[in-house]
């Protein structure tokens, strides 16, 4: 979280694709769509949402959907 918060002030985007049937709740927490990432060390929230996470199983067999979802939030 600390590095994501630090990176949120930089021209940086992080794309994560979850492969398999694992529980991706921790990855979804990094995404910041619901709650912005918080750094306890820096005592601040991310300036902007720089992480985009998509479980591959949601777009398997739909390459256009994967691209659209992953690139949606990248400025």
Image (cartoon, rainbow, N blue to C red):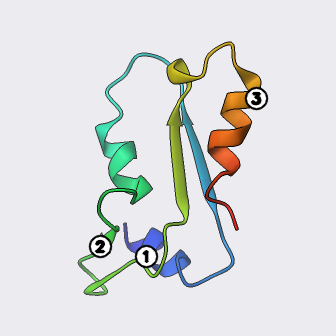
* Disc 1: which residue: 5
Instruction: Mark 1: give few (<14), some (14-19) or many (20+) Cα within 10 Å.
Output: many
Residue at horizontal 23%, vertical 78%?
Answer: 40
Secondary structure beneath dot 1 equals helix
Residue 53 placement (x, y as % from top left) = 51, 44
Secondary structure under badge 2?
Answer: strand
Seen in the picture, residue 4 relative to 53 is either above or below; the reply is: below
Q: Is residue 17 above or below residue 35?
A: above
Secondary structure at numbered mark 3: helix
User: Relative to 20, is 59 on the left or the right?
Assistant: right
Q: Contact, CB < 8 Å: mark 1 with mark 2?
A: yes
Instruction: Report which quarter residue 11 is drawn in.
Output: bottom right
Q: CA distance from mark 1 to mark 2?
A: 7 Å
Q: Of the residues tagged 3 and 2, which is closer to the observer?
A: 3
The x and y percentages for residue 8 are 52, 77
- Disc marking residue 64: 3
Q: Earlier in the sequence, mark 1 or mark 3?
A: 1
Residue 15's disc number: none
């Amino acid at each position: 979280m600390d590095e994501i918060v630090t990176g949120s002030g930089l021209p940086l985007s992080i794309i994560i694709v979850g492969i398999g049937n694992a529980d991706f709740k921790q990855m979804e927490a990094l995404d910041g769509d619901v709650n912005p990432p918080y750094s306890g060390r820096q005592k601040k929230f991310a300036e902007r949402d720089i992480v985009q996470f998509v479980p591959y199983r949601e777009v398997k067999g739909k390459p256009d959907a994967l691209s659209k979802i992953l690139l949606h939030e990248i400025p």
